[in-house]
Image: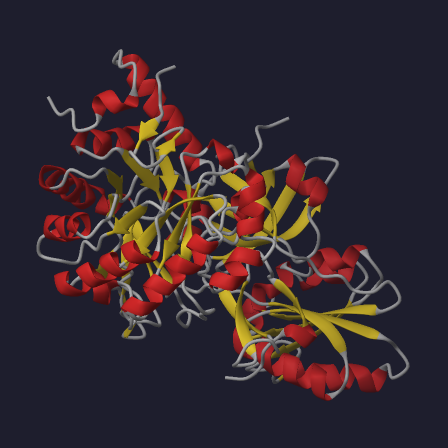
Amino acid sequence: MDTPGTMIGNVNLKGDYYAAAFCAPEIASKARAGQFVHVRIDDTRNDWILRRPFSICDTDPEKGTVTIVYKVVGKGTAALSGLRPGSICDIMGPLGSCFTPPPDATPVAVCGGYGAAATFMLTRGKKGVLLLGARSEADVILTDKYEKAGFDVRIATNDGSAGTRGFVTELVPRLLEERPQEKFFFCACGPHPMLMALARLLREIGQSGQLSIDHRMCCGVGSCFACVVKVNDPGSADGWRYARSCAEGPVFNLEDVYTGD
Amino acid sequence: MADLSVDFGKFQLKNPVMTASGTFGYGFEYSRYYDISRLGAVVVKGIRMTPSHGNPTPRVAEVTGGMLNAIGLQGPGVEKFLHGKDYMPFLRKSGATVIVNIWGTTVAEYAEVASRLDAEREGITALEINISCPNVKAGGAAFGTDPVLAAQVVSAVRKATTLPLITKLSPNVTKISDFARVAEENGSDAVSLINTLSAMCIDIETRRPVLANKTGGLSGPAVKPVALRMVYETAQAVRIPIIGMGGIMTGNDAVEFLLAGASAVAVGTANFVDPFAPLKVIDGIDAYLDRHGFKSVRDIVGALA
């Protein structure tokens, strides 16, 4: 078997989106949906020094491999997209909290863009639903994998180039209308404004779920307090506190998510 | 294997490698990776009287050779620190040598925190007075860039506790050794330097500063030469021991600080890159000493040829 951290694949999905697979037997055996790995990309460079967090999209515990799906957004991810199989990255993980849909509920992944990577391992449980929002068809990824896994996939795009035109949150009431008797559990990952809108909506209509929320991360283990997000805290004078998304999250229970300013 | 122990007079450390405050949480976070009692000392994130939220996000930005942070001293407050299970009670059980970094928004608050920690001092080896955080409006560097206020803070804390005191200095001054002298004259048992360098970066697409706080503190390999010069300059100016820090990533980096006159060092940003960095720095110092036939780490402190 390869040395842990050895890249075994790095393929372009479409546009700026890639899927990279690494040999990481220990992470593969432990990882749960919603958790992440913290990757040091090319430690010979000094124009960046920090690790990059990536949601774990998929694992193969037997082969000992872990797959991440990423979009090229900066120097680190650009360098990652240029690495070839055989390259070695220092990978920490699995880190953070995970999605825990109750066994009697249908999991509904509500994702924005490549947020769909964070919820993919939910497809190992009960057959569920993917509600995917994206700017346009160019940002719709992983839907084929969800469909293959038996998920009911529904898409909303801002420009209407795939699925229905509009926001992903608009797909939620439609789903509830179509399947009124069903108990759902919503598992979400996407841009912050989408998550806040979804949290308000789910509360309003009395649905339960969890949201993966994070912020620009640094240490990945809870020591630096860079990646904090606001969570409800009745004990605090302001009613909220900053929680570390790497250590206390990234998956937070809906009732803990602070949706104020 | 050379003798790595260091002697600060009022306290001793098993080796010269500490963690820099704010880069190691409260020790708990790294205890899942290794036994933190192997470190010279764990210096915890800054503690004041009350809990504080810290600054809005984004709080960090990456720059060439380092990073900026403007965390803003988020913290649990002294009571939760003393009694919350993942804080001091955990640290006492861990067997780690603990140095508590303290701050306040007034001179009186610094003294109050020191006195509160003094009252429950079991397991606390020393206090580090933070007069150098560049990211809080009141407190921190406001005290560390004015020699009169710096003297007041150190002197007030000195009266509040008999615990050994380390004063952490700001590099954002004209002459850092002047501030080291102020700390020494007012009863500090050691000085630690440097805190981060006040800095900024801008996203040219949005035309906004990257950090919500607009400015932050620069750390990482980029600051090492500056930190080293400041340690060297301070070593000529004071008799109290110096804890050197600023961009230490390897044992060889640490040796440079020891040669410049630091009696011990702290590892900061490197913790974010590699959780095991402080242990590798200890091993690296040891290997250097063996390679050059030094029996003790004390033999290379200030030992420029």
State whether residue A19 is above or below residue B148: above
State whether residue B298 is above or below residue B139: above
Which quarter shows the C terminus of chain B? top left
B170 and B155: which one is in front?
B155
Left or right: where does residue B215 sit relative to residue A133?
Answer: left
- Is residue A13 visible to the viewer in this orientation of the structure? no
A29 and A115: which one is in front?
A29
Q: Which quadrant of the figure has residue B203?
A: bottom left
Left or right: where does residue B185 sit relative to residue A174?
Answer: left
State whether residue B228 is above or below residue B85: above
Q: Position of residue A119 (x, y in %)?
A: 68, 61
At x 67% / y 50%, what residue is drawn?
A58
Q: Position of residue B52 (x, y in %)?
A: 44, 70
A217 and A74: which one is in front?
A217
Q: How is the image coloured?
A: secondary structure
Left or right: where does residue B71 sit relative to residue A245?
Answer: left
- Is residue B178 visible to the viewer in this orientation of the structure? yes
Q: Position of residue A169 (x, y in %)?
A: 65, 82
State whether residue B140 is above or below residue A183: above
Q: Say how many tags the image has.
A: 0
Q: Which quadrant of the figure has residue A8?
A: top right
Q: Which quadrant of the figure has residue B227?
A: top left
At x 38% / y 39%, what residue is drawn?
B18
Left or right: where does residue B188 sit relative to residue B284?
Answer: left
Which quarter shows the N terminus of chain B? top left
At x 45% / y 71%, what residue is drawn?
B53
Q: Position of residue B128 (x, y in %)?
A: 33, 50
At x 78% / y 64%, what residue is drawn?
A101
